[in-house]
Image (cartoon, grey):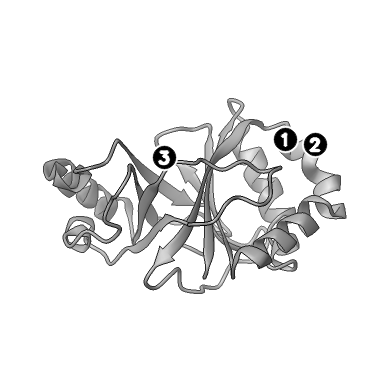
Amino acid sequence: MTILELRQYTLHPGRRDELIELFERELVESQEELGARIVGTFRDLADPDRFVWIREFADMTTRLAALSGFYGGPVWKQHRDAANATMIDFDDVLLLEPVGAGFPHAPRAAVAAGAPGSSRVLAVVRTGEGLEPAAPDAERLLGARPVVARTAPFPNDFGALPVRDEQAVVWFASYPDSEAARSARERLDADPGWQTGATAVQLLELEPTPRSALR
């Protein structure tokens, strides 16, 4: 079963671009060589000091091996002080599994060769017990077929990186531009029924970084 992490980092003011430059230069291929897949990296358009990214593994065994190898390895040892210096908090993490089809594989720009572009990704995060992962009106509201994920039924076996323990369902949808994303947000705002049963809701509008594969 494919495993996903939705990771939201709170950064020191004004340090986000610094972290993105370091991450895209040093921390993408070095993780993927060990079995992780960096699905997407993003700026949160509502918070200039939040960096959001999605990491994928083939299964929990692969996750443990990849995380152990990376965080115990030379690349992270070399760059961790610079990366950690940008961060206030990195514990806002959901451990998820896809419901149905996951994220398609897509090409990634070379280091320093890409540009943010105009595309947007919406991540709709609902937390609460007993939530239906694929609401029948999700595609209508989002205006796109979402990738749906829910909390994975496995304990976090890499304790150095905490994850949130509540139950969550997340919809991810991609848009060609900010106008299409804005229209989706307006539909969600106009029809709050999709929030039924959730104890908390978070709506992230994300701008892909230059090397993000998910755009």
Q: 3 and 19: which one is in front?
A: 3
* Residue that appears at 54% across and 62% down: 3
- Other residues around mark 1 within 10 Å, as few (<14) / some (14–19) / many (≥20): few
Numbered badge on residue 84: 1
Quarter of the picture holding the C terminus? bottom left
Q: 47 and 111: which one is in front?
A: 47
The picture places residue 64, in percent across and down from the top left corner, at 70, 59
Numbered badge on residue 81: 2
Q: Is residue 189 above or below residue 174?
A: above
Marks 1 and 2 close (CB-CB < 8 Å) = yes
Amino acid type indicated by mark 3 = Leu
* Residue that appears at 43% across and 69% down: 102
Amino acid type indicated by mark 2 = Asp
Amino acid type indicated by mark 1 = Asn
The first of marks 2 and 3 along the sequence is 3
Which quadrant holds residue 115? Answer: bottom right
Measure the alpha-carbon separation of dots 1 and 2.
5 Å
Q: 113 and 108: which one is in front?
A: 108
- Other residues around mark 2 within 10 Å, as few (<14) / some (14–19) / many (≥20): few
* Residue that appears at 78% across and 41% down: 80
Q: 165 and 195: which one is in front?
A: 165
